[in-house]
Amino acid sequence: MTQIPDGNALRGKRVLVLGVANEHSIAFGCARVFRRLGAEIALTYLNEKAKPHVEPLARELDAAILLPCDVQREGELDAVFRHLTETWGRLNIALHSIAFAPKSDLQGNLVDSSAAGFGLAMDVSCHSFIRMARLAAPLMTEGGTLLTMSYHGAEKVVPNYNLMGPVKAALECAVRYLAYELGPSGIRVHAVSPGPLKTRAASGLKDFDTLLSEAVERSPIGELVDIDDVGLTAAFLTTPYAARLTGMTVHVDGGLSIMA
């Protein structure tokens, strides 16, 4: 596992992380790095079934706020931001690590995907990020950073990624437009694109173990990244070191994405 440096690069910053499901979640890796660098953390959990898995992680991070948030449920995302407004009054960083597609659409060919399944995947995986941005912007009175998670299948065809390829491509495009629209307010927007990771969400992909082994073989570094690698990159993008970067898709994949 990657060593997380101690420091105070994010001391005094308030961070919302959406999408923690368990200790293997990319969102948790990011939250752990943010906390190690001094930030205050707010976490959300999907529902009551997920809550027992997230509560111990919230305690580990000394998270100031832990709230339910199912972006498919009307009003839950708005409720999170009402609570942030009442409790914190401001926000510096918001990270979106949420994606979903019905299993039948995810594991079938794109040409066979249903309109309902495609629409649901787009709403949960892409438009919820836009909704998050709309709610977060008024709290970022001193500027801030919005982050979301993508994958190389948005740019190139990755066998078995299927329906999620076009959905993540839309997400990356949304990042660019939001960067343009929110830039005058001092808000920077990025997509982070990790290499294959052993997460619960990724395990739903067909032949995912094959994808992992091929990633190791083809990566110039010759090993998989982990959730802390992703967190370190996400943290960098929120600091003054990246003050003139926005609208980017940043690959954290050991160089896998440069290979033919």
Image (cartoon, rainbow, N blue to C red):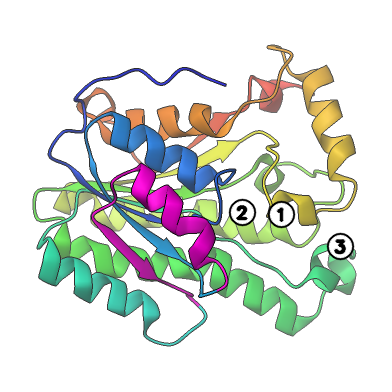
Residue 88, position as x, y percentages in the image: 12, 60
Task: Give the mark toward the camera: 3 or 2.
Answer: 3
Residue type at numbered disc 1: Gly
Identify the image quadrant of residue 43.
bottom left
Q: Residue 198, located in which quarter of the rendered image? A: top right
Mark 3 lies on a secondary structure that is loop
Query: What stretch of residues is rendered in magenta?
Result: 49-71
Whether residue 176 sits left or right of residue 84 in the image: it is right
Name the residue tied to disc 2.
169
Q: Do the residues labelled 2 and 1 touch (CB within 8 Å)?
A: yes
**Residue most toward the top?**
221
- Looking at the picture, which amino acid does disc 2 mark? Ala
Q: In which quadrant of the rendered image does the C terminus lie?
A: top right
Nearer to me, 6 or 208: 6
In the picture of the structure, the residue carrying the numbered disc 1 is 165
Q: Which of marks 1 and 3 is nearer the N terminus?
A: 3
